[in-house]
Amino acid sequence: MAYKITSKCISCDLCKTVCPTNAIKMVDERPWIDPKLCKNCVDSIYSVPQCKAGCPTYDGCVKETSEDYWENWFDTYKNLKSQLTNKTDKTEYWKKWFNTYSQKYSEQLPVNG
């Protein structure tokens, strides 16, 4: 699901310069996001879409919403999965998480005496 340029766009061209897939084109002197090229920056080094992150109005680039429940669900899943798998060392991340959680949990257990 691609992003789109809204009427709040001030045509500063910042989104065009930061888009990693070059999906932002000029049509009739207004920026337009090619939905075939826009990947929402998923499966890239970025954790957020760069057009939205670079927009000075913050509302100049917004995600196109779909009425399809499953399309929205899978987009959310892909985004969350990409954030998780982009951890530099997943094993260490989960070990640290487990150790922290298990320690806090064991502190809450009643002591039999």
Image (cartoon, rainbow, N blue to C red):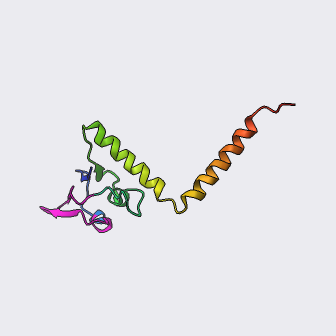
Residue 37, quarter of picture? bottom left
Examine the rendered structure and indicate whether residue 29 appears above or below residue 107. below
Q: Quadrant of residue 73?
A: top left
Q: Residue at x 48, y 53 (%)?
A: 84
In the displayed structure image, the side of residue 105 where residue 39 appears, left or right:
left
Report whether 76 appears left or right of 12.
Answer: right
Q: Is residue 109 left or right of residue 17?
A: right
The residue under the point 42% across, 57% down is 47
> Magenta span covers which residues?
16-38
Q: Look at the picture and state if 94 lies above or below 37.
A: above
Q: Is residue 35 magenta?
A: yes
Q: Is residue 107 left or right of residue 68?
A: right
Q: Quadrant of the C terminus?
A: top right
The residue located at (33%, 66%) in the rendering is 18
Q: Where on the picture, by quarter, is residue 68?
A: top left
- x 38%, y 62%: residue: 44
x%, y% of residue 86? 47, 59
Percent x, y for residue 39?
Answer: 29, 57
Name the residue furthest left: 28
Please tell me how many numbered marks the rendered image carries: 0
Q: In this view of the protein, which residue sits in the foreground, 14 or 78?
A: 78
In percent of width and height, residue 70 lies at: 30, 39
In the image, residue 17 sits, relative to residue 31, either above or below, namely: below
Q: Nearer the viewer, residue 102 or 76?
A: 102
Q: Find the residue positioned furthest to the right.
A: 113
Q: Within the magenta stretch, is there residue 100?
A: no
Residue 79 lies, in percent from the top left, at: 39, 50
